[in-house]
Structure formats: structure tokens, C-alpha cells
Image (cartoon, rainbow, N blue to C red):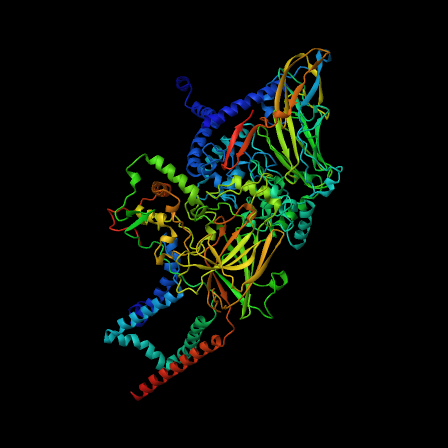
Amino acid sequence: MMALRRRAFGLVAPGGLAILAVLAIAAVSAAPPLAAQEDAVAAGKVVYDRWCAECHGETGQGDGSAAASMLPRPRDFTQALYQIRTTGSGQLPTDADIRFAIENGLPGTTMPGWPNLSDGEIDDLIVYLKSFSRFFAQGPAPEPLDFGSDPGGGPAAIEAGAAAYLTMLCEECHGLSGRGDGTSAPTLEDWRGLPIRAADLTEAWVLNGGSSVEDMHTRMLTGLDGTPMPSAIDAMNSGVVSPDEVWQLAHYLASMGPREMPPLREVIRVGRAEGGLPADGGEEAWAGVEAFYFPMSGQVVQLPRNFAPTVDGLWVQGLHDGTDMALRVQWNDPSNSPDSNWDEWQDKITAALDLDGAEPIALDSAGAPTVRPPDAVLLQFPFEPPEGTDRPYFLMGDAREPVYLWTWDSEAGVGAGRGRGLDSVEPLAEDPVTGEATWEEGRWTLYLRRPIEIESDGLDFAEGTPMPIAFQAWDGSSAEVGKRSSVSTWYYILLEPPASSTVVVTPLLAMLLTGAFGLVLVRRAQDRRRDG
Amino acid sequence: MKRYLSHPFWQGAIVIVVSYVAFEWVIGYVLPVIGVASAPVPSSVILQYMLTVLVGIVLYMSADEARWKSFKKPIHETMVASDRKTLRGILMVALPVLIGWLAYQNVRPSYAAPATLRSVHPAPPNQLTFRGETIELTGLENPLHEEGSIEEHLAVGKRIYVRNCVPCHGDLLDGQGHYAPAFNPVPADFTSSGNLPQLTESYVFWRIVKGGPGLPREGTPWDSAMPAWETILEQDEIWATILYLYDQTGFTPRTWEEEGEGGHE
Amino acid sequence: MRSHFWNRSAALLGVVAMAACGGGGGSSEGAADDAGEAAPAAAAVDPASVGTISGMANFGGMVPTMEAIDMSAEADCAAGYGADGPMAQNVLVSDGGLANVFVYLSEGVSGAPAASGAAALDQVNCRYTPHVLGVQSGQDIEISNSDNLLHNINATPTENRGFNISQPRAGITSTQRFQVAEVMVPVRCDVHGWMQAYIGVVDHPYFAVTGPDGSYSIANVPAGDYTMTAWHEEFGTMTASVTVTAGGTAAASFDYNGEMAGADVPMGDALVLEHGTNRIRVERTQ
């Protein structure tokens, strides 16, 4: 080839150089797919091995060393089943779809976004990911669906969307309030046969494909491949819902709860109740009372750890009247445990998730679990107001310094206890804390009430003094017992003191004194000057 | 301008303003931006610092008779001069209002969390016990540098890290794991120049082995979610994880040759 | 590690090529099409040179009792069944004949007419009708909903692309296709965990599903020597040799019995969850 070209160059005039150059470029640009592809695969493998392989596995099957502690499991690239796409059900994702998932991560899963990777690295990575599956070699990149345009939101659109939610029977899985507690929720499996949650639509910040109206609209029309979430496109094309109604449904979904995780405020402000404390956790009495959100994590500090907890946060409201205090704690849990409808779910979780050494719950001869644990929540305080910032250890204290607990579970109800470490609760029978809990449409509402100061052993609250508080939660139907819980670190709870005259008097006094002092100073200085 | 700069009164005023800006903004917000580990200073501490600065200024000014005189002069002038009547009037109103406002800030009901002063890298002990075995920390090196294949150690470290550390410290080692929002204090960011490069490997070893519960009081051991990993991991697994942390972030640890002590701040 | 992937690709390309040569570009889109352009058009079937295969799937021994399905969550569906209520359909035996066995020519087919017409899969009283369906690669499958409630049709093949479509009321029809041969493609409804169907995809029209009495018949098979395979969801696969003569009727029967329960049932690459070990393993069963 080289010899041929040299001879040709010798024959033609220099003007032919341009033609040759064009020919050479044409030859190169016809060739690149293979060479460039191989380079990209090699470069993508470097990125993949460094950042991705430990979860997704060296061979891309989603079976890395850490995979067993993750639910949902890491993606298996060999099947090319991608949840987050703009293409039709069962179709391959576009490169832009894969890039979207890499850049943004999949909220609510263990997949983070990767801002540390450059555009070029992500390009190479996409080529490498696609090389894991035979499907990408078979056809051209699919075209994204036509999503139409958003006719706009607003109250009327949201109302129409709420009607479409019922027309499309979304509640079969997601529940009437969208908390993932539908009738079919306990039986849902992903394509591997592993248990998978119906998304809790009221916590949009943990939706795998993003929380915007556009994101939700896209997910409905494409479906989430590999999960039970189907594409609504045939229902729309058959006229069950109109294209506008699908957009309105997206607006409704986006209105079901906050889009972003509520900002963390460290102090629960327990206001003074005007006209008496609420007698229960009913909506009416608590409407308008400020609610504080606390995110929770799996208990991953002590063995056995909980890598995929059900409860990922709770809301707390409080009121007091100077004598008693009442708290309302709410958290989402799609199962009202114990519930035999969730037996299979409990067993599947036990089988699928790394229990980190915990004893799995055994089945009896009929295949039913021998134990159906209850749901539970616990509020934790120090026994005494802390000196300085010292507190007991946040995981229910330790042998040296215990914690004072308000406990509730769906079988035993409300009580108090002394904790000396996880899994170590000694009941305090004398404690006057009372309360009750109700479960409705995937949400527990726990009402607690206690005198601010008590005779028996336990924390005396003081108005105006922030007291440490921490939380723990369990979902029995997901085999969460003992140390396998959701936990929070320490926050504060503060009982609003009565309106005090000092707030007005002290600044006034300070102003008067300063003014008088200033007058005296000036007068004396002027007198002295006159005298001098 | 020059006249002001050379005048003791205005020097004092400038020192006060600059100090306040430094305490309130530079320490808390500018330093983290340029990569130095820092946190906002609580207001009660700022008040203490400012009083110290004020006392310092008065001491300095009064040490020299002439300087003290010219320092006092503008103040005295304002109190007596007839051509400063308006300024005097304004100050006579503004100062009491300012004091009244400060007093209100102090007595009004506060719903802020009590300030926690937490030492991020407290001084390490000289030795620790690993499941009963005493290990001298002073001068301790990562034993894996000297044995076996570094690639294998890194592979072990990566496996340990992803399995155990990712939920809090994150896949990107930036302290942004999927559970990070639930923790206070937030998990350490290994990509910050304020962490790994400031520490010896033995210091990191101590922090991993003993975790939150092993911190001294100034490290607020009661609210750190860092497990005491001696209950879960073997020594070699911890050393391999330390190798991985430095390798993946590209930082180099402080060494005992450079520094007499472990890297505490 | 990577060689595994390339081997699989190569094997698949082989399948695609075979499909193309045999089917003569029967599909209008997708993978098989690319290879199909180079393949010769299929020879037209000469009526004088074809015969019929017919036979039985017999069942001997104790017939396992089927479990009742709890359809209380969907009263409208449950009302469609008699006093005994709905029962599972894994093993249906009548007078010694085993229903829902998918039988097809697995070797010896050297040319086949393109797929024509559409296959139908219906959802009636929260069950799939039929429970086992055979289709030719590239053939339209019209999936319809006769129940006025939400079903999703979630097909999870491994050689083909799957689909998962919602049909929230009666009267909706979705048309889908599988481009390459795959025995079998599982289909389920996630709303109703008991709903399960199987679609057998082969690249020629010589297949059948045994009826309630266990009998089947495949017409218009070109004369020749073939291997037949029978597939059942509980009892696995069996093969038989058969010789078809022009104008004749060849017999091929398959004898199942209760002891074969738990046999390996081919289903593409099955992904098996090893209970208690927390590991997924990929099991090649084909």
C-alpha cells in the first residue's frame, strides 16, 4: 500500500496531493468504527474496572463482590435491560439514556451519580457497557419515543391527573396515596425473581429515574424494564387515557409529596398548644403544626447490619401545654406487620439480601414463616439533660451511659425503657408515657403523650432547653428485627417556653442605660471643656 | 485615605472590622472553598474573640501617651465639638438601639441546636489494643508495603471498601454515600485535602479500628456513626483498605520521617 | 472473561443465520432481517410433497393435584369459575392425555414459509388463554385483555428483547413480535402473581400445542426425516424421531409420567436464586 502510494505520488503533479489527501481521509473515515471502537472499549474498561466492577462485576452481570448487600441489585449489562430509557418497552437505551443514568445515578438505589468522570470517560464507558451485551451489536440505536409536549400543570391538571391515576389503576401497586402499598405490592419481583418495592411516589427524591414532571412522564410511557412497572403506551394509544392526561398524571405524581428531600432542621420545635393538646394522632388536630423530617439509614455500624432498610425517614410534630407534651411521629411502611399477605415477601427478602450473619427466619412445614415480626419505632433520649454537649452513644447508649426510650411496636403498643446498647431494652413499667398508632395506606401515625416532668425514672424536659433525641425503626415484614433496623443520629427537641416579659424588658433596659450613660459622658466632657 | 490609615483611632476601627470579617466569614466559609478543612465559628465564640481584640486594641493604644491621646481625640471631639452636633445626635440614638438589639438577640427564645465544637482530627493515643493485642501507634507503618503484591492488597482493599464503607463514604470516596444524609456529623470526605494527606497511615488505622466509640471527648464519640471495625475486619483487611484509600484518591500519607507525630490538628 | 461474551455472540449469530436461511426473511424488522437479505428466498411449499404429523402427549401414573388460586383480590375474575374456584394450570391431564405440551420440529427443517397471520394471547378471568402459545419468529402476537381491570404483560425472554405493557381495561390490544427462536419465553402479570403463560418461538410453522385431550397435529410438513421436541413446564423436554412422507400421516407421541416432576425445564438462560446463600447464579439450561 505504502509502495503503491509513493509511486503514485511520483507520477502525479503536486496538485494531485490534495486528491490523495482526500482519498486518504476517506479511507481513514471509512475505517474508524473498528479501530476507534476497540480503543473506546479498552479505555472504557479502565474506567469500568476502577469505579464500576466491584458492584456490577468484572463480566458485567451485576454480580460484583458487594452486590449481595444491595436491593435492588446492580444492573446486569449482559441482558441490556435498562430501567431508565427514552425508548419503548423492551428496547435498547440510547447512548444519552445510559449517560443520564451515569451522570445522575439512580436515586433510591446504591448507584450514585459520577461527577468525577469526564465526558470522554463516560463516552468510553458507554461503549464498554454496551459491549457486554449481544443485543447492541444487532441493530441501529433505537429512536426515543415521541413524548409530545406538556400542556401545563396547575390545580385543574393535578385533579385530572388524580382521576387518570385511578383510570390507569396505578393504585394496584402504588396504593391509593402512592406510598407503594397496593394490593399487588407484596408479590412484586424484578426480572431476576428478586423482591422489588412499588415506588413510594410521595418521596420523589428517591425515584430511580428522577423527580421532575418530565422524568415521571417519560417513565410512564417507557416503563422500567426489568421491573414490574409496565409501559402505558398501548393504554394511551387505545384511548384509555389521552396524551394530555398522561402529562396531567405526571403533574399529579409530582404533587404527591416534596420533590427534594426536606431540608434537615436539627431542632424539633414543640410549640405551646392553644386550647389543649390533641387527644390522638388525627389529622385535624395536627394540621398546621410544623413537621420536621429526619432521614434514616440502615443500621450499618454493628453486626448484623441492615443494608436495605424499609424506613428511610420519619416526620415528627410536637405540642405541649406546660404540663403534658404530645408528639406525632409518621413514617411510610407499605406493610402493616404482622400481615400474612407479606409472608412471601419476608421470605424472599431473607433469601435475597445479605443478612450479615443474622439468623434467617425459618419456614414451617406449610411454607409459612415461623415468626412474623411486628413493625416498631423507638424514640431515644438521655436520662438527664446533658452537661455540655456530652450525650450517650447514639445507638441506644452503652453499658456506661444508658438511654431513656419511648418504645412502640405494632403488637405491644407504647412503653418506656432503659437502653444499654442495641438490642438491650429493659422496660420501665412506672413510666407514664401513653399513646397509640394507626396504619393507613402505607403510613404509620404514632401518637405519644407524657407529662413534661415525671416522678419515675426518666427524662424531665425543661421548657426552652434543647434535649437530645434520636430514632430507630423496624419493618417486620422485611424481616427487620433486633439490630437490623433503620437508625438516625442525635437531633434535638425543644419545648417552647411561655412568652416572657424579659424579651421586652431587657433590651429596653439596656437601651435606657446606654442612653443615660452616653448622656452623662457627653455632659461631663462638655462641662470639663467649658471649665478648662 | 492615608490620613485615616495612620490615625490610631481609625487603625483600631479597621482592626475591629477586619477581625470580625475573618472570624465570621473567612474561617467558616472562605477556607473550605480553598480546600482547608474548617467550619463556621459559633456566635458566642466570635463574641469572646471580639472582646479579646477590643482589649488588645485599648492596651496597645494606651501604652504610649501620645498615641493614646490621638486615639481618644476623635471620640472626644465628637462628644464636645459644636460642629459635630448632628453626628453626636445620631450616635446618641444609634448606640442605645444597637445595644438594645444585641440584648434582644441574647434573651429572645432560640431554637437553634446548641453549638458543638468537634475536633475532626483529635490527637491519637500512643497505642491501641486490637481485640486484646497491644499495638504501638507511634512510628507504626503499614506492614503491607513490605509484603506480598500491592495489586492484590489494593484489590482486597477495594472489595472491603465497597462492601463496608460505601454506604456512608460513597463510591466516589467523597463522603456522599447513600446513607450520608442520615448522619451528623457527616461521613469523612476522603477526596478533601484536609483529610488523608494530613494524616499518617497509623492515624487512619486507629480511626478505623476504634471508630466513633474510640474517639476522645473532643471528637464527640457519642454521635459518630463510624463503627469500631476491629469487631468486623481483620488487621490486614484494614491496612489494605488504607492502601486503597490513598491509591484511589491519589494522595500520599504523611510519614513519620517528616513529622514527629501522627497527623493531628 | 470477555471470551465468554464473544462466544455467546458468535453462537447467537449462528442462530440468526439459521433463522434467516430457514425462514427466508419472514420478519419485517429487527435482527433477523439484517442477515436475511443475503439468504435465498424460501422455496414454495408443494402441496404434493407434504404430510402430517400427529400424536399424543400421554401421561401415566399419579396426577399431581393442582393448587387452588386465591383470586379473592379480584372478585370479578373469581366469579368466572365454578364452585371449586380457579385452579393452577401447571399440569392438566384428561383421560391420560397431557395438555399444554409445546411440540415442534427441532432438527431437519431446511426451509419454511414466512410467518403469516397473527397469533393471539388473551387474558380472561385473570388467566392467560392459551396457557401455552406457539409462534413463528417474526410473527405478530396480538395480546388482548377481556378483563375490565389492570393487567400488565411482562415477557422476559433472554434471546429476544422483552416487553412489559399495561392494559388497564378490557378491549386494549398490544401487538408484539419475537425475532429469533426461543423455547420458551415466560410471560407473567405482576399485578396478579398467579398469572403465567409461555410462548414458544421457532423459526418455522411446524409446531403445535397439545389440546385438553393431549392430542396434537401438525399439517403441511415437507416430507423428510426430523427430530421433534416436546416441552412441558413441569416435566421438561423429550425428543422423538419422525419421518414424514408425502400425503402420509406420521405418528409421534410422548410419554410423560409423574416421576418426571422437577425435571430441568429449559427457559433460555435461567437465572436461579440460590436460597439462603444470597448469590445469583446463571444457569445455562439450553
Q: Is residue C109 above or below residue A291?
A: above
Q: Quadrant of the N terminus of chain A?
A: top left
Answer yes or no: is residue C37 visible.
no
Say which residue appears at 33% left-offset and 36% top-offset: B150
Q: Residue C122 placed where, x, y %?
A: 71, 33
Say which residue appears at 36% left-offset and 85% top-offset: A523
Horizontal side, residue A24 vs residue C264: left or right = left
Horizontal side, residue A98 vs residue B7: left or right = right
Observer-nearest of A9 and C153: C153
Observer-nearest of A454 and C15: A454
Q: Quadrant of the C terminus of chain A?
A: bottom left
Horizontal side, residue B261 vs residue A464: left or right = left
Q: Is residue B74 above or below residue A72?
A: below
Observer-nearest of B203 and B12: B203
- Count of marks, rendered view: 0
Q: Residue A194 placed where, x, y %?
A: 55, 38
Q: Is residue A442 above or below residue C187?
A: below
- Residue pushed farthest bottom? A531
- Specify the quadrant of the image occupied by residue A21: top left
Observer-nearest of A60 and B81: A60
Q: Residue B3 placed where, x, y %?
A: 30, 69
Horizontal side, residue A427 vs residue B220: left or right = right
Say which residue appears at 62% left-offset and 42% top-offset: A220
Answer yes or no: is residue A275 visible.
yes
Q: Residue A527 placed where, x, y %?
A: 33, 87
